[in-house]
Amino acid sequence: MFFIREAFVRKPFEKKSLVYVRGMTALLLTAVCFAYFVYLAIQVYEDQPLIKLLAVNLTDSYPSPDIEMCSANSPLRLWYCDIVKMDWSIERRNNCTGLVKKGVYSPTMFCQIYQANGSIEFGLDSFQQQPSSQVRRIDFYWEIDNLTASVSQTIAIPALSLQLYDPKFNPWYTGDIATWIPRQFQAYRDITMGVAKATTMQRYTTDIYFTPQVYKAIRPYDFGSLLGMIAQYVDIPTVSTNWLAWPLHFNSNFSNTAMTGQFSIQLASGTMNIQQEQRQHTILSLLALGGGAFGLVNILYVILFGMNRLTPWGLVHRIPFFFEAKPIPAYARSDYLELVKTRTPSIRSSGFHNVDLEKAPLTDYHRWAEKVQDEHPLPDAPSIEPSSVTADDKSFHATSERPLDLEARVQELERILADYFLDTKHLDRMRRKSYRHSTT
């Protein structure tokens, strides 16, 4: 802190004990403030971002999500897909032609993947005429080929496991995986573990409602977010799901030798949920909080020990490049050098404290007085014999000595200003430097 140096400067009439107490207090306050700065810096370094929840209205449409359908211990097939338009017309595709491809196949898991690839979009407003590509709902009719094998490893009825993915972020969309940030790998882990999973069962109909959502992750080492300005985000699109299931009434099409069950997907909301990371601690917040602590420390110091001297000199004033030493006139060089080298009388002397101007002790001729005398010399006084000095002559000499007393008092006032109100050390250094420059 800038007041540490001033705290150890002993001013007139101060005891050493006061200087020690003031200095130790200044060091203690500085240590507390510095420790708080370190604490804030650690918080910035170890910052854990908060999650800001936003709701953005979808203004157009939303592409159909990808669906991974898996059956245990038995292959599955899709009989057909019914695409329900916004006007409730139905487009049927047998075997879901053009929409389904083979997924993971293993001795214990058989999967198929539904991907519309942007050809089907869910509409939002059913009261306005919508493009033919926008739909209201998609129904899937499915069958497990071997029901006996399907239930051999479970005590539940045969079922399919369904996992919904955003078309731009799924296990089949990993071409840019080399540029992923850690948060993308975490989101990928979550969706593959089943964060948006649903189930459809034998002789049940399942309605799956999905809501689009986006996680906006701050890019690592982003200087804008670290500073507290605009951050650069990486968008991670996903979907969240809710589902309801009801048993089917008797239908000859759903039996052990025909279709096993049915499920449908539809958009649950016209609002996209956005989770946006936001840093709790930034460099600007560090400076703001640190500045508040710095101000509090200074207030405490001022309350205890008063204000410091004014120091109208900064680091720039110490750079010679910004200042040009002007040559000093030859007639003033000797007087100026003596003025700089001479230490003015100090108010610490008890003889100069609260002394009437008329009773102030005489001092030598000050350099300023000498300069005035040199520039404006008085006429030589006629020589007078001591025996012929009258009372009027003594009064004249006493009056002529008063300017010297006044000069001494002015010097004392200057010393008070230098000790208590204004730091003039830099100005003195500039004067010395200017004099050295003029003499070379």
Image (spheres, grey):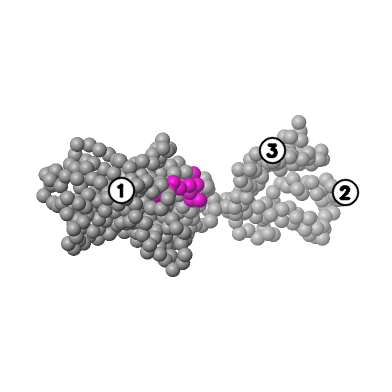
In the displayed orientation, state which residue is furthest to the top. Answer: 440
User: Which residue lies under the disc numbered 3?
Assistant: 321
Mark seen at residue 95 = 1
- Taking depth in this image into account, of 290 and 191 the one nearest to the observer is 191
> Which comes sooner in the sequence, label 2 or label 3?
3
User: Which residue lies under the disc numbered 2?
Assistant: 380
Query: SS at mark 2?
Result: loop
> Which comes sooner in the sequence, label 1 or label 2?
1
Kind of residue indicated by mark 3:
Phe
Residue at 77% of width from left, 40% of height from top? 326
Cβ atoms at labels 2 and 3 below 8 Å apart: no
Using the rendered image of the protein, determine whether residue 148 is visible from the camera's viewpoint.
yes
Specify few, some or many for label 1: CA neighbours under 10 Å numbering under 14, 14-19, or 20 or more: some
Instruction: Tell me the quadrant of the picture where the C terminus can be found.
Output: top right
Provide residue 138's location: percent of width, then percent of height. 33, 56
Q: Which residues lie in the magenta part?
A: 223-238
